[in-house]
Image: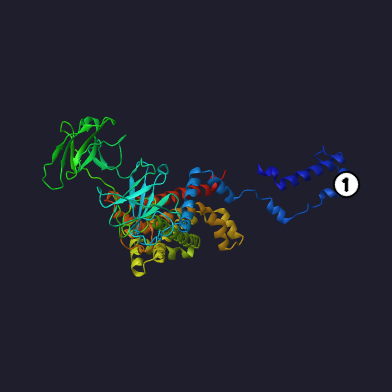
Amino acid sequence: MSSKYSHKEKLSRKLEQNIEEQLQNLAVSDKDDLSPEEMEGISQDLFEFAEYNAQEAERTGYSNYSYWRSTFRMFFKNKMGVAMLAVMVILLLFTFIQPLLPDQYDPNAVNYYENALWMEIDADASVELDAIKKTKGSLAEADGAEGILTYVKVPNSWGVPKAYAQEAADSEPVELPLIVDSANKGWYYAFVPTETPYMYVNSEDGSKTTFQKAVWIRVDEEGGIYSEGIKYTEGELIAGGEEGTILTYFQAPANWGVPQVNAATTMRGDPGIDLTLTADPENDGWYYAFVPAENMMLTVTSEDGSLKGVNKGIARLSPTEIKVKTGFIDNMAPNSVFWFGTDPIGRDLWARMWSGTRTSLLIGIVVALIEAVVGIIAGLLWGYVRKLDFIFTEIYNIINNIPSTIILILASYIMRPGVLTMIVAMSITGWIGLARFIRNQVIIIRDRDFNLASRCLGTPTRRVIVKNLLPQMVSVVMLRMALAIPGAIGSEVFMAYIGLGLPTDIPSLGNLVNRGRSLMMAPTLRYQLIIPAIILSVITICFYLVGNAFSDAADPKNHV
């Protein structure tokens, strides 16, 4: 269809029209042969040579087809490939942006607990106390104030909170002045004296408090017993208990009936005393009893004795104890400060994860580029220049018969551990597979007609290789490069696994996976393996799918 609009076709049609007009003027257009007289009457203008322009003639031999434009058009039709490319680009960019974000930790810095505490209170008056810094800026200071700096944050519905400290759970409380932290909205702070380390917070109207004068004990379906100071019942607390007793509420599954409770002291072998539970008239399913303070260890069974709690309940009034925590923040689960948690020596896994991803991607991309450049050049020469076939074949036999793992290990032993060592060790043998594949492809197409024609016209070897051979293998090269990147990252993970990877002060996915592997058997620490494994999987899948999609798009057979 393109010939319909070509420059050559337009010129031919115009010339035909001119000839027809001339013949019509001579009234000889309907004759196949002319007499000598008629031939002499034809204008000599019809026999002049048409003007010839070599550049225009060459241009008419081409269409508007563009290989790379068609390749990218075909690639962007693949929605999965485009989505994976977007994920890959975002991941790559974020690894470089992450250190520039605010409040980021150094990936190699050991983080220690602060000399202060942060108390966060939710709507149910549950308290979360931690020594991890949750406010911005420097720690608060006050002239002449002594005690432990404690930050407090309450729900907005509490209004302006009030804080109290006491020497023990049953001693007289002393009100503490809470100061608004101007640098952190919603936070207050106070200095809790060490001689009165027990603290609780009330709402402005006194309806909410973190320290109830009672204990709530709940039994779940599996028999687990939870002892909490959070108020689970409605209405006022039951009054009338004797001095030295603790109001304790009980709730058990319906199939337990009325729970039976035995209260014992902390001494081993104490038979304890059986408590008589009373149904709470204001809260269906709840019972209560006044437990002697010394008999705090509670054993709960079902009404018929067939079911028993798997652990003991504890009847103990529990205002929050303000006690500074020391040491580094080791094995901290993911939280609002350390999004991916911390490792066994308190380093931030969020910072280490992205720093390690950046390092591993750098290694993978550089190794892939080296393998591509060396492999393409060697493969083209190996396949096209017949005199070099013997030399490259022997090199291939030597390298291919030595396990790549041994070469990696030897290079790591000989050279100083580092990123450069990993790149060199992987690049020594990585190019040989691509070179052999390209050599085989070149042998298949080097004697085709278009290459023979180029050689007959005296086209230099370099031009034949670059213009005739290399474009035929773009799809294969792109696929091999895309797979080489996750392959290099996998090799780096393997080297870390056998103890020959990067030093621990250079974060990498290999180091992180190897560290997490040793903690896999601890359920609370599995996040240290799961998180880097997920990122490694995402990188591998993205490069694989993008490489396949671009390989298909680069194949000229698909350009229709």
Name the residue tied to disc 1.
40
Q: Residues within 10 Å of mark 1 (few under 14, many from 20)?
A: few
One can see residue 526 in this view: no
State the residue in front, 315 or 142: 142
Q: Is residue 97 left or right of residue 514?
A: right
Q: Quadrant of the C terminus?
A: top right
The spot of residue 207 in percent (x, y) is 36, 40
The spot of residue 284 in percent (x, y) is 28, 30
The spot of residue 274 in percent (x, y) is 14, 37
Q: Is residue 381 left or right of residue 536?
A: right
Display colour scheme:
rainbow
Residue plotted at (44% across, 49% down): 542
Q: Is residue 389 above or below residue 220?
A: below
The spot of residue 244 in percent (x, y) is 19, 43
Badge 1 element: helix
Q: Quadrant of residue 389?
A: bottom left
Q: Quadrant of the N terminus?
A: top right
One can see residue 227 in this view: yes
Q: Amino acid at mark 1?
A: Glu
State the residue in front, 365 or 135: 135
State the residue in front, 75 or 379: 75
State the residue in front, 231 or 500: 231
Q: Is residue 316 above or below residue 366?
A: above
Q: How many tags in the picture?
A: 1
Q: Is residue 333 above or below residue 401?
A: above
Residue plotted at (24% across, 47% down): 170
